[in-house]
Structures are given as structure tokens and as C-alpha cells.
Amino acid sequence: EPEVTQTPSHQVTQMGQEVILRCVPISNHLYFYWYRQILGQKVEFLVSFYNNEISEKSEIFDDQFSVERPDGSNFTLKIRSTKLEDSAMYFCASSERDTKSGELFFGEGSRLTVL
Amino acid sequence: QKEVEQNSGPLSVPEGAIASLNCTYSDRGSQSFFWYRQYSGKSPELIMSIYSNGDKEDGRFTAQLNKASQYVSLLIRDSQPSDSATYLCAVNRGGGYNKLIFGAGTRLAVHP
């Protein structure tokens, strides 16, 4: 069964360092998303991406965050200068259609720990 | 008012019983509704999607949608200990937005 894959599964970094989280969405999917979940809290939307551009972003997704689809398969989330409060599980998701009718499938997540 | 509200639980049911999970949402423009299951430390796993009023059944799971009341529910029949998890309700943001808004989840505990 096709699945969304994410790397790394866990990353530990120092405050102020840049981090890149990688995702390979399901191959025929056209819409891509990043969500995050701080420990014990709810899953929060960060950004959606379609047709090589951002279609939505939340207030959390400030100038420190960026996304890119550098080739036909990868979808990356970059955090330019990490803060302690960026520590969370980051989930990539993809869907065939937009959220009005499309089901989102999530990867296993990348746990980011900022020290 | 929270966009998607769920009771945090825990909802404790005996094995073999029906578990009933509820969710309300505030955006009348929402068009798609999803239930995800999340085990501790794992990612959300899609269980059901529902788009129109009424019931939708898939195996032991039934999703119910009432758009007039802005209410979605999930019934789990013949609950098993392996169903013990947090159940997340997710609703698309209406008005042309392309994102799902998640509730905080209801923790279900099925005891033998």
C-alpha cells in the first residue's frame, strides 16, 4: 500500500540551527501538507502546497519556515533558525484532491528536539 | 469558540461494547469530515471520511454527520482493546481554504 515517508524520524538540534525535514508523498498525490503536534497538544496545520506553490499557511508558518518541492518526489520543510518552541512532531501529509473532497494521508512523522 | 471540539475523555468502555465519539464544529462552510486514530507517539491514521448528511458504515465503524447541528460522530461496534487510542475529528475549513482543522481528540480506553 502506498505511503508517505518522512526522514529523519528524530532530529536533535541546537537553538538557532537550521533544520530540513524531508517527505516523499504518495506518488499520484497532488496536494502536500505539513502539520505539527507539540507533545500533548493537538495536530496543528502549518502549510499546504499545490502546483509548486503555497496555497495556505497558518500564523505559525512565519518567515523562519519554508517549503520546497526540489524534484518530482521530495517535499521539504526548512526551519531557518530553530527555537525551543519548535520542538514538536512534524507530520507530512498528501492527498489526491483538495480538502473539500480529498483524504489526507500522514507520514510517520519527524520528531524535532531543539536544545 | 473552538473550531473543532471534542471531549478529551478518557472514554472507557468494556470489550465488545459500542464506543460513541462526538465532535462539533463551528464553520458552517465545512464540507468534508474525517476521523483519524492516533496511537501514542504515532501519526494520525485515517479511519473514515464523510461528506454528506447521514450515516456511513465501514466494518465496525459508522460515521454520522448532521450539518444542520454541526455535529459529527463515530461509533465503534464490538470495541476491542486494540481500539484504545486517541480519536481525532478533522474538518475542512470552508470558504475555499485548503486545510483540515483538527480537534484535540478523545482518548478511548477499551478494557477487557
Image (cartoon, coloured by chain):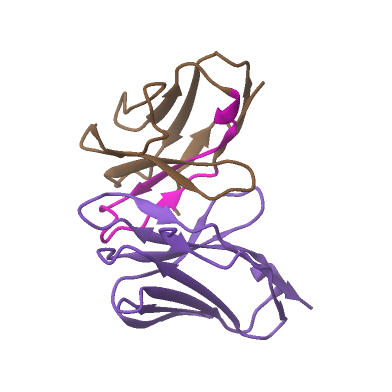
Chain colours: A brown, B purple
Q: Residue at x 65, y 79 (%)?
A: B79
Residue A107 falls within the magenta-colored stretch: yes
The N terminus of chain A: image quadrant: bottom left
Query: How many numbered circles does the render carry?
Result: 0
Q: Position of residue B66 (x, y in %)?
A: 35, 79
The one nearer the camera, B99 or A109, is: B99
Q: Residue at x 31, y 62 (%)?
A: B27
Left or right relative to B85: residue A5: left
Q: Position of residue B55 (x, y in %)?
A: 38, 83
Residue A67, above or below B85: above
Q: Residue at x 37, y 66 (%)?
A: B33
Left or right relative to A66: residue B85: right
Q: Residue furthest right?
A: B112
Residue A2 shows up from this direction:
no
Which residues are drawn in magenta?
A: A84-108
Q: Quadrant of residue A10?
A: top right
The C terminus of chain A: image quadrant: top right
Q: Position of residue A80 (x, y in %)?
A: 45, 17
Q: Residue furthest front?
A: B1
Residue B25 shows up from this direction:
yes
The one nearer the camera, B1 or A100, is: B1
The one nearer the camera, A38 or A112, is: A38
Residue A58 falls within the magenta-colored stretch: no
Q: Quadrant of residue B18?
A: bottom right
The one nearer the camera, A1 or B84, is: B84
Residue B58, above or below B30: below
Q: Position of residue A21 (x, y in %)?
A: 48, 28
